[in-house]
Image: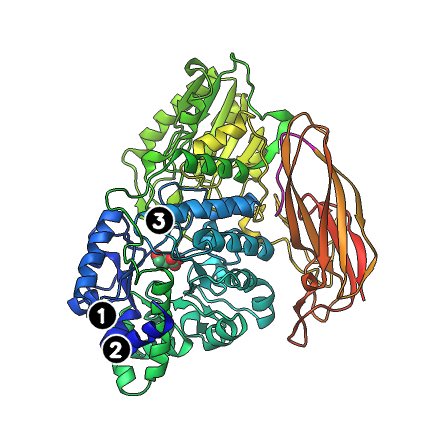
Amino acid sequence: MDKKALEALLQDMSLEEKVMQLVQIPGSEYEADAEITGVTRGQADDKVKRLAGSTLGVWGSKRLKKIQQQYIKEHPHHIPLMFMLDVIHGHKTVFPCPLGQGATFDPEGVKKGAEVQAREASADGVHATFSPMADLCRDARWGRIMESTGEDKFLNSRMAVAMVEGYQGDDLKSPEHVAACVKHFAAYGAGEGGRDYNNTELSEHTLREHYLRAYCEAIKKNPAMVMTSFNTINGIPATGNTFLMKKILREEFGFKGVLISDWAAVGEMINHGFAEDQKDAALKAMMAGVDIDMTSGCYSGYLEELVKSGEISEKMLDEAVLRVLNMKNDLGLFDDPFRGIDPEVGAAVTEESRKHARKVVAESLVLLENKNKALPLNKSDSEKIAFIGPFANTKRLQSSWAFSGEDENTVTVFEAASEIYESGNIKFAEGCTMMDQDSVTARGICHVDNWQEKNEKLLSEAVEAAKWADTIVLCLGEDSTQSGEATSKASLKLPEVQLRLLSEMSKTGKRIVTLIFTGRPLELADVAKLSDAILVCWLPGTEGGNGVMDVLSGMTSPSGRLPVSFPYTVGQEPLHYDMYSTGRPKPASGPSEYTSRYLDCENGALYPFGYGLSYTNFEYSEASLSKEKMTSDETLTASVKVRNIGDMKGDVIVQLYLRDITGSRVRPVRELAGFERVSLNPGEEKEISFAIKEEMLRFWTAEEKWESEPGKFNVWVCDSSVDGTPLEFCLE
Ligand code: GLC
């Protein structure tokens, strides 16, 4: 439909119809078994069901075609319903959780994964996904760190851009693609105490220089939607925050798409103490520019009254409705409300999608320890391997947000091992329950009957298997229901029952390769003392077992790097590598009295951002700069040679870090400014170069401008955020 026709449609719509285009209701209004991702507020009345502009949480080509047929028939202007769903790391083929995808440092691979996810979601009738989550996350206590790509604004920017491009492609009308939604705008990851939904206190400097960067880069790729966040920013809820939504999002970032609230966030401004009642909440959200009210009922209940009273102008209403109609038009829904879906053929996992997911899994795994080359596993036929632990043979390898994927599609670690090793050479033992008794999860309390007896039995079976084996692959971690929304934790330790299993395994004296499945950084210092190797596997999804075994067996060398710092203790959180020096930086060695330090812990991470081991070794040499001075219109090149000095092929993530040594505001001690995944055969050497341009040196200055400032800069081209020797150049 062309622009004129859309505007003519808008003019022909009744006030009631217009208001309802801004209303999103839960999918359960149309299908009983829809996924509900928030607190529901009772049943929508028939008028709302008949006229609501969009719904969320339902999928399936046959079901959605039936709903759409009925809906269009009854709608006065036959405007199609929009279907939205959280496909944040997989629909049928579930990829590693986003934190694991961040660990790949492979935006191209992540983009291709988003294309697979979009194709599958669209085949099941979905029009829009609520992804990428571009929130900066520096606090492992926050369970939604699992849904992010980590603590670095540059890495998050590259990943969020890759996801928007993968989901949307070049033509939103294509049934291969879906609309993307950049969320949660803004700074949702900065909640005080790492507690979900909590207030964030951020200076404009910190907001702009760190927290807004990834949203801004992703919005440059024209995502169809942006979603408001639940938190207040400096006391004002994002969903009613005109500075954030009008000045920054619309004016500065130039966002012209649809702004949708998060689940019930409009109405929750009452709980925040920012809105008097639902009518006031509707007013404040509209004044902030929120186009769609997700499930709160405030718009459907009060927007028409607010327009009739003149508190909301019809012009403002029309602008919001036109953005929603434009989105439906961009998706091609007016030409074909079914976007080419075949009700008889929905989405399914394919060999091709599995192949790519398996590759992303392998790239996401981060090897933290490998004492005496415990890995890769010994290939000899006589090697006896015991796969032990609650993650060793479970199909629950995806996150709590992969609810449209089916567990039975998942390949477990032990199933994958059975494809590689003779059955007589491997054994499985569950070892212990996943969690301690009566652990609290996103799904409620986890209670196991006869928990004590069950664990005694599981442990004795595990000890038997361990005594039989030469090597123990111990599969531990945090249950997938303990990360994601509303899962903040004050402890980052593994469950007691798992630590006990590790301790008992250690007493057998066998080699222990510990795999950690998790949606967040955990405290691993004690695990490292008792393990010969540690491999972080995140929540790897459908091809989890195969990807893990590809690395354990040595078919491919691990190449993942930490997208987030792993602390010595939770007491260090929030923890991030790009910290400020302070006036009394703790020296790397020697006395540290009267410096910025803990008496009882290091300042930095146990395992830092950008860190990860390989089965081979890489030697960096001849780091150099093309010149020592540059003007703002010049480019400077930083280079380094990297050689594979080991006996296995491997990928290395070469990283570029910068430091602005003196500024009108203090600057981080290091900031990631580039990275490149490089494949090297044994003995092979390559020179890696990064262009440094003036715009990479800009920051939010004391004059409240986004500018670079002349002066000295340090440059590292190295292997992690704590590696390398700095070079220096001067911006004139
Ligand atoms: C949830 C989440 C958001 C999600 C939305 C729809 O509360 O905060 O990330 O996309 O509701 O499910």
User: Which residue is the site of mark 2?
Assistant: 12
Magenta stretch bounds:
609-617
Q: Tag 1, which secondary structure?
A: loop
Mark carried by residue 77: 1
Residue 6 figure quarter? bottom left
Which disc is residue 121 wearing?
A: 3
Q: Nearer the viewer, residue 255 or 505?
A: 255
Instruction: Farthest residue to the bottom: give it.
Output: 310
Query: Which callout, 2 or 1, points at the residue further toward the start of the chain?
Result: 2
Q: Secondary structure at mark 3?
A: helix
Question: Along the horizontal axis of the image, is 475 left or right of 672?
Answer: left
Check disc 2 and give the amino acid type: Asp
Q: Position of residue 350 (x, y in %)?
A: 38, 36
Q: Is label 2's Cβ within 8 Å of ligand 1? A: no
Which dot, 3 or 2, sits closer to the camera? 2
* Residue drawn at 71 percent across, 68 percent down: 708
Three-letter code for the amino acid on which mark 1 is drawn: His
Of helix, strand and loop, which mostly describes the magenta segment? Answer: loop
Disc 1: CA contacts within 10 A as few (<14), some (14-19) or many (>=20): some
User: Residue 18, image x and y in percent?
Assistant: 27, 75
- Amino acid identity at mark 3: Ala
Question: What secondary structure is marked by label 2?
Answer: helix
Whether the magenta-drawn stretch holds residue 93 is answered as: no
